[in-house]
Image (cartoon, helix red, strand yellow):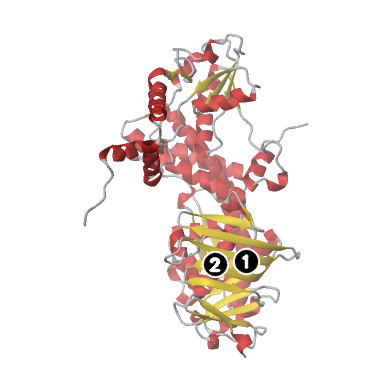
Amino acid sequence: MKLNSLSLEHFRNYSAVNIEKFGNVNILLGNNAQGKTNFLEAIYLLALGKSFRTNHDSELIQSGNDQALIEGTFTRDRQSEIKLGLKIKKHGKVAYLNQLEQPRMSDLVGQINTVIFSPEDLNIVKGSPAYRRHYLDLELASLSPKYLNELRIYQRTLKQKNQYLKMMRDGKSHDQLYLDVLNQKLSKSGGYIAWARNQNIIELEKYAKVIHFRLTQEKEQLQIIYLSEIRSNDLVSPETANKALLANFQKMNEREVRQGITISGIQHDDLSFIINGTNVASFGSQGQKRSVSISLKLSEIEIIKKVRKETPILLLDDIFSELDQNRQTFLIKSFEKELQIFITTTSINDLDCRIIEPPLILKVTDGQVNNRSKDG
Amino acid sequence: MIKMQYPIQISKLIDSFMKLPGIGEKTAARMAFFIFDLPEKDVTDFANNLLAVKKNLHYCTICGNITEDKVCEICLDKTRDQSKIMVVAQPKEIISFERSREYHGYYHVLHGLLSPLEGTGPEDINIVSLVKRLRNDQVKEVIIGTDATPEGEATASYLSRLIKPVGVKVTRLAHGLAVGSDIEYADDLTLMRALEGRTEL
């Protein structure tokens, strides 16, 4: 998968930018607050239909304008070129595929694949359980439309149930049959979600274990553990997970009605990372946490390659400044030749240029992008 | 600085238009000024039509459809198939099924779906009278025609668990590919549902 050309109109701080040609390794060079990350964000938006930085579409539009436009042409590994477009208005987005307007944003999602490395990746290890769940959900949703659908049903039904439990507590309604139906719906979606999460974690661990072992010069054994109220022997199939979850809801029913809120469920799930038998989040060093997050991200590339049969485009947002020489070298070496990479950096010296093939250097200054290699 | 304000009549009319679904303040203002420019006869007709809908129409005491009389035309039609009742959320959905001319049973309108977030619990939709209608032994099948949304599905499951013990067959409308559509253009979710609901040939 490669990005061939990109044009931006009134996107963030870009008035109008049109880049006709990219290399395999592209370095976006510039001082802070010039628009380097905005450039990566545009590519990310074409891949996933939403930003990794904001949920407010209006922030994506250059101030004083009504809409922003992102267009990119991509070549997939089997050579067919596609053109993706995204028109962002203040109250919503419209996706275009080969110039044709698509009825749903979801028609855009999954056309191209990206993996983003950013300093925030550390939060996968260090951050809250909600952050980790979100990370897991995002990764799964981009690989499976069914997962995304079940997740939406679960979240919506959970809100309905919590509201109904409140109505019951306040004496406004009392219908155990309806509560049973909601529990049954939650268990069905939740069982599928828990099963899929567990499968994904097993897969993730398989790759991350090997990568992490190499990254740490064969010193650290990484384990990833899925923390869920559903026991691991019930996670073997969506059906068994469904049954186990339903039993939990039934067991908790009385307490849930009394307290007016859902207690059981997969909305509390979490991940735990173990190195040589010790929990990294609680006892690991900053460096270990960073290594784990890099191992996870590199595993993501492998999973995308396996599931989608396509190499993703890598977006590296200012990560080299935070890595020591060993990790930098390892990271660059692990990117295979066929991967297309976009790197933002304030200084070219941060990058070990001898290792990567001659990069295309794009100088970013105040919403302008100049191809420096042309200037000589 | 003098602040320009709408004449009171216009601003009252704007408020009225804003009660309609999907109408914001700007559209409402455009409509209000448009009304002012219309011939008086058109406006009188408009006002009378609005009143007539409210004054002359009400819900059918049997099925909940909209009717001028106590009981709607469909419920009065004894040539229909007595063994089937189709459950829908809104009266306008009856029109859709009637247009297809393929369904000849009776209907039942819930006037909403179960959705606590909108304040609608099982007591707030038209379920009690449905259960009463099932005491009639001639009813053999209830077809649930609610939307394929989480609320539509939950309402369908609720009704099925409520009705099945009475000994009446409960069926759900199929979901899947639109007739005359290309599989190539179907979205992933529709394809998934179509696959789940596949039938043997």
**Up/down of A91 relative to B65, above or below:** below
Counting residues from the start of the chain, the first of labels 1 and 2 encountered is 2
**Up/down of B83 relative to B45, above or below:** above
Residue at 63% in and 35% down: B175
Other-residue count near label 1 (Cα within 10 Å), few / some / many at <14 / 14–19 / ≥20: many
Which three-letter amino acid code belongs to the residue tagged 2? Ala
**Residues at discs 1 and 2 in contact (Cβ within 8 Å):** yes
| Residue A138 position within the rendered picture, expressed as x and y whole percent measured from the top left | 54, 58
Front-lying residue, A338 or B75: B75
Residue marked by disc 1 = A72
Name the quarter where the C terminus of chain A is drawn.
Answer: bottom right
* Number of the label disc, if any, that sits on residue A300: none
Q: CA distance from mark 1 to mark 2?
A: 9 Å
Residue marked by disc 2 = A42
Which three-letter amino acid code belongs to the residue tagged 1? Gly
Front-lying residue, B94 or B54: B54
Residue at 48% in and 73% down: A119
